[in-house]
Image (cartoon, rainbow, N blue to C red):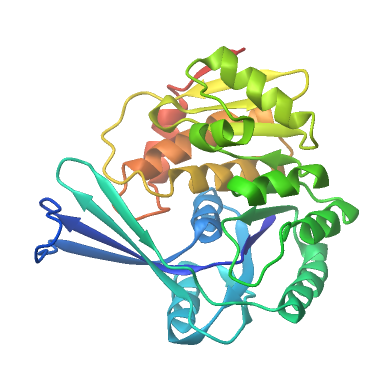
């Protein structure tokens, strides 16, 4: 089975481990981790770890883009990125010993309407050899809102399920295109509906209101509480056991990769959710963003609490 992951705004992800953050002072970094980043590439790793073939596309630029492409080769992700002028962004995540996470996210290179049209045509060409499509992350400067809709429509015409993982105004604008799945976290769903969602019942009601706007399923990632999947007539939750989380960054992205892997194998969203939550939890126990130990994911999968809501 083959997945196509789309990352419009890829990045070099840098993780700095520090004792503590002291604003206005020199910071000594204890450890540094580099990876080819962006939500779509974290999802790529999640799907790759599940045994799927993964083709990745989107935009890369400059020397930073060359680094990202070189990492894809090493990791076994097939590179189908388009090159654009400028420089791919670098995103820095600083983690202190108390578990705090502080992120600095660069904007990335600008793209043109011609770049976006070239990408649409490129994706249409690739759709013939893939089973599922994921669209992840923010859009570079120069992109219209909505930007993902033409890609969603192309995948739908090819009969491919589409998972969309973005947020804010961009997510709201893409809802009428009716992707198969949208994957907000709790805060992103709260921003969509305009009120707090402290309980599972409220989460289900809010998610169902989003399905009425187009998507078939809304999967809400809830950190250590796992995730819920809601359609017009079904709602399930999957909750992992407690783990020693060392790096929560990218866990929601890995969940998308796990969901996509399940869909590629013929499961529906509810059926794919427990394994997706397992790999997401396993990735929180791994120091490198987007990675997980398959054996740990299998152990967690045996302990997942699945409930109908």
- Which residue shows up at 61% across the image and 61% down it? 54
Q: Is residue 31 left or right of residue 157?
A: left
Which quadrant of the structure image shows residue 2?
A: bottom right
Which of 173 and 19 lies nearest the eye of the viewer?
Answer: 173
User: x%, y% of residue 30?
Assistant: 12, 61
* Viewer-nearest residue: 173 or 43: 173
Please state, as top left, top right, bottom left or bottom right, where the C terminus lies in the image.
top right
Q: Position of 87 compared to 80: left or right? A: left
Q: How many marks?
A: 0
Percent from the top left, x then y, of residue 243?
Answer: 30, 30
Q: Is residue 263 above or below residue 3?
A: above
At 63% across and 30% down in the image, what residue appears?
193
At which x and y percent is residue 4?
A: 68, 60
Q: Is residue 194 visible?
A: yes
* Residue that sits furthest to the right in the current view: 157
Of residues 139 and 57, the one drawn nearer to the viewer in this rendering = 139
At horizontal 64% and vertical 48% (from top left) the residue drawn is: 169
Q: Is residue 27 left or right of residue 254?
A: left
Q: In the picture, residue 13 is in which quadrant?
A: bottom left
Q: Where is residue 78 shown, x and y percent of the image?
A: 59, 71
Which picture quadrant has residue 276?
A: top right
Residue at 58 percent of width and 21 percent of height: 203
Q: Quick check: can you spot residue 162?
A: no
- Left or right of 145 in this view: 275: left
């Amino acid at each position: 089975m083959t997945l196509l992951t789309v990352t419009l705004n890829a990045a070099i992800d840098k993780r700095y481990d520090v004792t503590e953050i002291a604003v206005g002072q020199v910071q000594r970094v204890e450890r540094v981790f580099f990876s080819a980043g962006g939500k779509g590439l974290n999802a790529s790793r999640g799907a790759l770890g599940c045994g799927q073939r993964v083709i990745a596309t989107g935009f890369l630029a400059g020397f930073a883009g060359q680094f990202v492409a070189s990492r894809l080769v090493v990791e076994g992700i097939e590179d189908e990125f388009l090159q654009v002028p400028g420089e791919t962004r670098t995103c820095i995540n600083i983690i202190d010993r108390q578990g705090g996470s502080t992120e600095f996210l660069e904007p990335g290179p600008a793209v043109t309407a011609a770049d976006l049209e070239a990408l649409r045509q490129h994706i249409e060409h690739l759709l013939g050899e893939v089973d599922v499509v994921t669209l992840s992350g923010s859009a570079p400067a120069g992109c219209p809102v909505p930007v993902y809709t033409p890609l969603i429509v192309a995948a739908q015409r090819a009969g491919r399920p589409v998972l969309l993982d973005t947020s804010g105004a961009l997510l709201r604008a893409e809802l009428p295109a009716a992707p198969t799945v949208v994957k907000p976290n709790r805060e992103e769903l709260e921003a969509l509906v305009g009120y707090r969602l402290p309980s599972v019942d409220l989460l289900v009601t809010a998610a169902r209101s989003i399905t009425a706007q187009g998507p078939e399923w809304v999967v809400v990632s809830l950190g250590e509480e796992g995730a819920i999947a809601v359609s017009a007539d079904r709602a399930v939750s999957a909750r992992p056991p407690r783990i020693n989380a060392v790096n929560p960054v990218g866990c929601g992205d890995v969940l998308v990769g796990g969901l996509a892997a399940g869909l590629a194998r013929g499961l529906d969203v509810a059926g794919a959710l427990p394994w997706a939550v397992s790999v997401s939890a396993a990735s929180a126990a791994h120091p490198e963003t987007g990675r997980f130990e398959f054996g740990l994911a299998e152990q967690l999968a045996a302990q997942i609490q699945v409930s109908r809501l």
